[in-house]
Amino acid sequence: MMGRMATGIPDIPGITEVPDPQFVMSTNGRRIATYSWGDDTADTVLLVHGFASSARDNWVNTGWVRDLTRAGYRVLAIDQRGHGASDKPYLDRAYVMDLFVEDIVTVLDTYLLDSVHYAGYSLGARVGWQVAVAHPERVDRAVLGGIPDGRPLARLQIDQARAYVDHGTAVEDQVTRNYVTLTERVPGNDLRALIALAEGMRLVEDADPDPSNPPTQPVLFATGSEDAILERSRALADATPGSRFVELPGRHHFNAPVSREFRESAIAFLDEG
């Protein structure tokens, strides 16, 4: 990779504007929306959002793209399958972990990137763990925020979510209600596709991160102090040699991406690479 720009913090007007998506075709024929900012000769940070979010929602509106480009990085973000401007199939088998990982590799290949710094949140962090393990040559170092060590979205009550979509039945489970609220908050979300995603992530036995086979790259883990997965996230960090863990004070799973401490810790960590 080319060296990161070393000219200080440039003034980048309008950096929080989102360009038109550039589509990459996945290996199984799904369109994956990508977005790029900054000098394409600089070190690249790949940003991968969480469940029911998008590149805009998770990374642009929270200041990550602005701060990373000001720090001299080229930023590449994607809308994961089922989200944003990317294709949103209703088939559960379209959302197994291997396909999420293949999407990342295909995007890197399309952009002619041998390796990148990776930053992911929630589902994006779970995918990042797997990319770092399965394709270690593609990830220099990783920031994994809000990563669970249990089956992703396991607490989502799919029957209640489907009844809400099909019949307008009120969602009684609080966690499921939180996910439905999050889904409806982000423009362009399709709850049927996200229900299929939650089902797809439960289809295979290896969907969970395996603490006995952690990434070997430097990893920064970050989780909110009010997040129910805090201790499980800390346990994953403890199982990852050479990793660091940052607890984000007063943050829960849904608002941790806006944490200034999270952004600053992540950029300081990436700067070490």
Image (cartoon, rainbow, N blue to C red):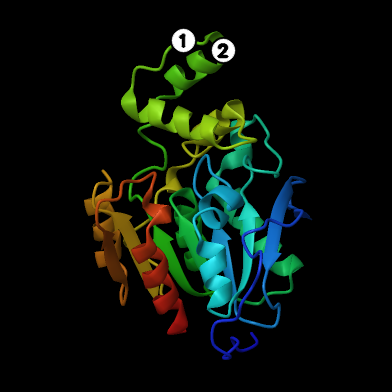
Three-letter amino acid code of the residue under disc 2: Asp
Can you tell which quarter of the image residue 46 is in?
A: bottom right
Q: Residue at x 55, y 17 (%)?
A: 165
The answer to whether 261 appears left or right of 87 in the picture is: left
Three-letter amino acid code of the residue under disc 1: Thr
Up-down relation of residue 109 to residue 34 (above or below): below
Q: Position of residue 253 (x, y in %)?
A: 35, 46
The answer to whether 58 appears left or right of 205 in the picture is: right
Instruction: Say which of 76 and 7 sits in front.
Output: 7
Mark 1 = which residue?
169
The answer to whether 226 appears left or right of 264 in the picture is: left
Name the element at disc 2: helix
Mark 2 = which residue?
166
Disc 2 crowd, CA 10 A, few/some/many (<14, 14-19, 20+): few
Taking the image as drawn, is residue 196 in sight? yes
Q: Position of residue 146 (x, y in %)?
A: 37, 53
Q: Residue at x 64, y 55 (%)?
A: 78
Q: Position of residue 173 (x, y in %)?
A: 33, 22
Q: Position of residue 192 (x, y in %)?
A: 59, 26
Can you tell which quarter of the image residue 158 is in?
A: top left
Can you tell which quarter of the image residue 103 is in?
A: bottom right
Disc 1 crowd, CA 10 A, few/some/many (<14, 14-19, 20+): few
The answer to whether 124 appears left or right of 262 in the picture is: right
Q: Are the residues at dot 1 and dot 2 in contact (C-beta closer than 8 Å)?
A: yes
Q: Residue at x 42, y 84 (%)?
A: 272
